[in-house]
Image (spheres, rainbow, N blue to C red):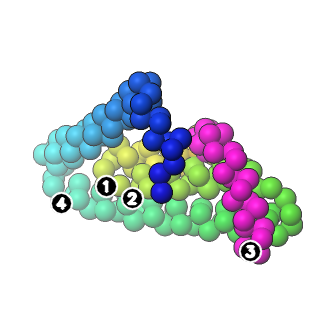
């Protein structure tokens, strides 16, 4: 359900401008991907490009799942020990973003997805997200403690 606070932000010119710029960026990435796939398809062959795209998606899925499970195990242990898993929230955020990019077909998103598995980049992006949702993360931690996650 939408909150009043979120709905009021749509009357803020800066917020709407940022939202539209994000939508523009979101629409330009697929166009660049299509252009690159067509160009490389002509250069290297359509079937090779399709195979490379599918294999990077599969490899990305395996890497993301492995990294996610490993970090989730550490997060569960910290919660069980009564410690706030701030770093694990940061890491999991970066892993999820990287995994989603790797699952998206295309070489640009695959490059960005693999880049997010570099710890410095992943943690930087994770910190940006967590910084804006710090209160929600603390509430999530309390919820997970209650239910012996």
Q: Which residue is mark 1?
A: 105
The residue depicted at 47 percent of the width and 36 percent of the height is 8
The residue depicted at 42 percent of the width and 30 percent of the height is 11
The residue depicted at 70 percent of the width and 47 percent of the height is 135
Highlighted range, magenta: 123-149
Q: Which residue is mark 2?
A: 103
Task: Characterize the local packing of mark 1: few (<14), some (14-19) or many (20 or more) Cα atoms within 10 angstroms.
Answer: many
Task: Characterize the local packing of mark 3: few (<14), some (14-19) or many (20 or more) Cα atoms within 10 angstroms.
Answer: few
Residue 33 can be seen, yes or no: no
Q: Which residue is mark 4?
A: 47
Question: On screen, 107 above or below 57?
Answer: above
**Marks 1/4: CA–CA distance:** 14 Å
Q: Residue 108, percent across and down?
A: 35, 43
Mark 3 or mark 1: name the one nearer the start of the chain.
Answer: 1
In this rendering, the label closer to the viewer, 3 or 1: 3
Q: Residue 36, percent across and down?
A: 23, 41
């Amino acid at each position: 359900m939408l909150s009043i606070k979120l709905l009021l932000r749509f009357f803020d010119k800066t917020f709407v401008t940022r939202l539209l710029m994000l939508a523009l960026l979101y629409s330009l990435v697929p166009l660049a991907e299509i252009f690159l796939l067509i160009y490389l398809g002509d250069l290297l062959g359509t079937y090779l490009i399709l195979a490379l795209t599918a294999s990077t998606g599969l490899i990305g899925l395996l890497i993301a799942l492995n990294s996610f499970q490993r970090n989730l195990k550490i997060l569960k242990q910290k919660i069980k020990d009564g410690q706030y898993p701030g770093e694990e929230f940061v890491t999991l955020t970066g892993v999820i973003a990287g995994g989603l990019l790797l699952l998206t077909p295309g070489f640009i998103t695959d490059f960005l997805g693999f880049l997010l598995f570099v710890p410095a980049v992943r943690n930087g992006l994770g910190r940006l997200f967590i910084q804006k949702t710090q209160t929600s993360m603390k509430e999530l931690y309390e919820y997970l403690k209650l239910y012996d996650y």
